[in-house]
Amino acid sequence: MAHISLWIYVHITLLLTNLDVGCAAKQQGTKVQAVTAPGDIVIGGIFPIHESVHKDVSFKPFGQPCIRIQESGLTEALAMINAIQLMNKSPLLAEVNVSLGYCIVDSCTDVSAALRATQDWSRQENQCSGSSPSVCSQPVMAVVGPYHSEIAIALAQHLTLQMIPMISYSSTADILSDKRRFPNFMRTIPNDKHQTSAMISLLRHYGWNWVGIITTDGNYGLSALEDFLSQASEQRICVAFKSVLPAFVGSERIHSAIKKTAETVHANPKAQVIVSFVQPVHMKYLYQQLKSQTLTMGGRAGSMRRLWLASDSWSSSASTASSNLSMEDIGHVVGFQFKSRPMTSFNEYLNTLGAAGENIEDGNPFMWEYYVQLNASENTDKAKLALKALRTLSQSARVDTIFSIEMAVSAIAQAVATSCKSEGRKALQTLQPWEMLKTLRMQEFSFNGGRYEFDMNGDMNLGYDITMWRWDGKKIDENIVAAYHLAFNNFTHYSTATHLHDLKHIVSKCSDSCDPGEFKKTAEGQHICCYECINCTENYYSNMPDMDQCLSCDPDTEWSPRGSRTCYAKELLFFSWEDSFAIVLLAFSVLGILLTLLVSALFLHQRDTPVVKAAGGPLSQVILLSLVSSYISSMLFVGRPNTLQCKARQVLFGISFTLCVSCILVKSLQILLAFQFDPVLQEVLRKFYKPYGIIITCVALQVITCICWLVLQSPFHHVSRQTTTLLEYCHEGSYLAFGVMLGYITILAFVCFICAFKGRKLPQNYNEAKFITFSMLLYLISWLLFIPVYVTTTGVYLPAVEMVVILISTYGILSCHFFPKCYIIIFKKEQNTKSVFERKVYEYSNKRMDSVFVSGHSGSLKQSRVKHEKILTFSVLKANSPKVSEFKTCYITYLGTSVTHHCRRRSKSL
C-alpha cells in the first residue's frame, strides 16, 4: 500500500513539473497542459478533457485547477491524434512530403480556461519552455474543436484576430453560422436550427403538443431555446415549462437549479415529453435528483418516467444513467446524433496503445493523469489497469463525435496538400492561416469514400441519426432507429428497428384529443393546447381530431346534425314520377286522354245524328280538344320541375280550360235562347249571340292575362332550402296573376252555371242545362276548396293538389257533358232520331201552354173579367242545324172563363 502511495505521489509530482510532454505557457504560477507532436503544419486541438474547474473566490487573474477528468473528452483528444497520424501516413501528404503536428489543450469545460489555454495560438511566436522549442515556436494554422458552443463563440472571436480557421466537431449553436461575426468558424455537423426542426417534426409525428424544455443559460442553450420556442409556436406545440440550468456544473447555483427543475418535472405530469439541450453531467445530476425526490415523496419510481428528447450534446452519453437508475426509472430516451461511420481505425489505435502496456501514458499528460486517477480507485497492477482504462475509453467513445473529428482533420490535411500542390512546399514557410481558411471554404474534399464541402455558412449538413436507449441486460445501448434528412425535413425509419413503435402509446397533451365532430375551445389566457372539446353545432362539422374550429357545410346542398364529423347531402324532394300518388294521378290523366279521344272519335263518327248536333256539333270537338290539353297540363305537374315546365303547365291549363268553358257558355246561351218565351228578351239574346265571337273574345282575354303574367313575373323553378332537404317546385312568380287567371275561369263557369240553371227544366233530349249546371257546380266547389288547401299546403305534394282539382274539373265536364250522349248513341239508338226529338219538343210545348193557362186562369178569378192577352214564344232547336231555330208562337186569350189559343210556326236562323 505504501508502495502504491509513493508511486502516485511521484507521478503527480512529475505531472506538475514535467515540461517535456507539453507546451506549458506560464500564467501567474499556473501551467497549461498540452499534448504535442512536431510537424510542418501544426494543428491546434481543444477538448473538454476535464469536467470543470475548481472555483475559488479570488480577485487575481490566476487560472483555476481543472477537476474530474472525463473519459469522453479524453477519447476525443485521442481521436484527433489518431486522425493526424493516419493522415501523415496517407499518400495525400506523402506525395507533397508534408507532415502534420498538433498541440492539444484542455478547455476544462470552462470559457476562461479555454481562452487561457489557447491565448498563444494567435501569436506568431509562442513563449514556451521545455525541450521542444521547435514545436512551440510554430504558429497554429488551424484548430479542431471545441466541444461546447459557449467556448466556440468566445474562442472564434479570439482567433478571428489572425483569421485562424477553426473546425468544430460538436458546437451546434445557430449563431455560429453568422459569417459576419464568425468568419473563421466552420463545423462538420449541422447547426441547432436543423436539430430543433427535426425535434419539432418528431413531436408533430406523434402528436405530442405539451412538452417541457430544459436548457442551459449559455449561448448554446439559450439559442436552442429561442429557436425551439419559435418553431414550436408555428407548429402549435405548447411548452408546459422551461427550465434554464447554469451552463457549467461548477456554478454554485447548479444544485438549487437541478432541484427546482426536478420539482417542476414532477409538478407537470401531463408533460410526458421533455426536450433537453444540456450536457451529460446535467442530466446525470437531474436523474439522481428526480429519483431522490420520488422516493422522498413516497411515490413509485415510475412516476419520474418521461420521454426525454435528447440533443446531440448528451444523446450518446448513456453513462448519465448511474448505477442506481434503470430505463424503467428514466423512461425512454430518443436522441439526435450526428451522422457517423464505424470507428474501426480508432479502435485499432486504442489496441495499439493497449499493446504498450505499462507505457500507456507516455507522451500524454492527460492519459497519464487519467491512469493515475483510475489506479487510485482500482488499486491493481499497471498492466491490468491499462487494459481497463482502454476498455473504459473505448466504451465512452461517441461514434459520431469520432467521425466528425476525423473529418475535420481530413479537411485540414487536404487543404494543406492543395496549398503545397499549387504553391510548392516552400510556400509552407510563408503560409498564412487566412489562406488555409480560404482553401477550406472553397474546396471539396473526400473522406471515407464520400465527397464533402462546407456550405456558405461554414456548416456541413449531413443530417442526423435518431437513436433510442435500450437496456440489453448488461448495459444501455444507443440503437439507431431512424435517419433525419435536412433537405426534405423528414424521417426514414429503419425496418429493422421496431423500438419507435413503443412510443405510440405515450400521450403528452394538456387536454385530451377532441374527436371528429368536436372542436377545441380555449379559455382566455390559457395555452392553445389547453382546451375544452365542444360539439359542432348544426350544419357544421369537423372531420379530424383536435380541430380549432368546425367547418361549415354548404348550406345550399349539405347539412349535418350537432356533433357531426361529416356533411350529408340534402335529400332532393319533388313530386317524382316514382311517387305512388303521382302514378295514380298520371294514370287518371292518361285514362282521361284516352276516354276523351274515344268520345271525340265517336262524336265524329255520329256527327249527323240529333244527339251530336244537340251536344253542340263542331263545338263538341273543340271542347274535347281542350279537355285533352287540360289532361296534358296536369301531367306537367309531375317530375323534377324546370322553368320551361313551370311556365307551360299553368298557361296550357289556363288557356285550354278557358276554351272549354267558353264553348260551354255558348251552349248555355244557345239553350237559353232557343227556349226563351219572352219575345223581348229573346230579341236581345239573339242580337248579342255570336258563338265564335264569344269564344274568341273569352279566350283572347285569358291569353292576354297569361302573356302579361309571363312577361312581367312569370313562374320559375325554385329550390326551397330546408334543414335536411331541398324542395324543388315551381314558384308561380306572381300569385296575383295566378289568381286572376283562375278567377277569370271561375267567372265564366259561374255565368255558365246561371244560364244553365235557368234552363234546367227543358225537354230531356235537350236537357244540356242539367249537366252543365252540375259540371260547373263541381268545378266551382273544387276550385273553392283548392284555394285554402293550396295556401296552407307545403312540401312535395303541393303540385298534386292542383293536379287533383284539374282532374276533377276535366272529369266532371267529360262525365256530365259527353258520357250521357255516348250512352244514348251506343245503347239507346232508337232515341237518336229526328222524330223523337220533335215529339219531345211538342210535348214540352203543350206542357208549357197548359202551365201558362192555369196560371192565367187563376189570375182572372181575381180580376173583374179583364181581358188580358199574353204572347208566349218559345223556340225549338231544329235537329238538322244548331244555328236554325223553329219558332212556335202561341196566342193565349184570357176572357172570362174561356180560354182559346192558336199557334203558328216559322224558322229563323240564329
Image: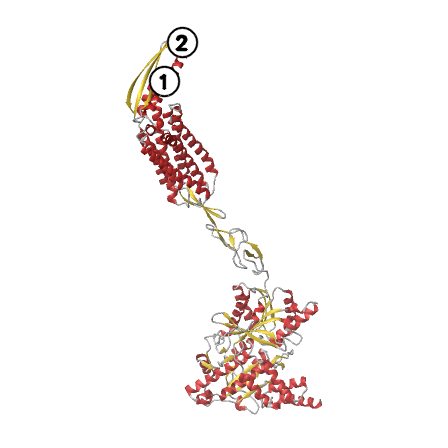
* Three-letter amino acid code of the residue under disc 2: Gln
Q: Quadrant of residue 353?
A: bottom right
Residue 120 shows in this picture: no
Of circles 1 and 2, the one toward us is: 1
Secondary structure beneath disc 1? helix
On the image, numbered disc 1 is attached to which residue? Answer: 846
Which residue type carries mark 1?
Asn
Q: Position of residue 344 (x, y in %)?
A: 54, 83
Q: Position of residue 12 (x, y in %)?
A: 65, 88
Task: Give percent across and percent down for residue 83.
Answer: 52, 85
Direction top: furthest residue: 864
Closer to us: 59 or 113: 113
Residue at the farthest bottom position: 131
Q: Is residue 569 above or below residue 774?
A: below
Q: Quadrant of the C terminus?
A: top left
Residue 688 sits above or below residue 137 on the image:
above
User: Distance from label 1 to label 2 (Cα)?
Assistant: 26 Å
Q: Earlier in the sequence, mark 1 or mark 2?
A: 1
Asked whether, in this view, residue 149 is left or right of residue 703, the answer is right
Q: Which residue is mark 2?
A: 863
Asked whether the residues under the numbered discs 1 and 2 touch, taking CB atoms below 8 Å apart as contact, a structural biologist would say no
Front residue of 317 and 747:
747
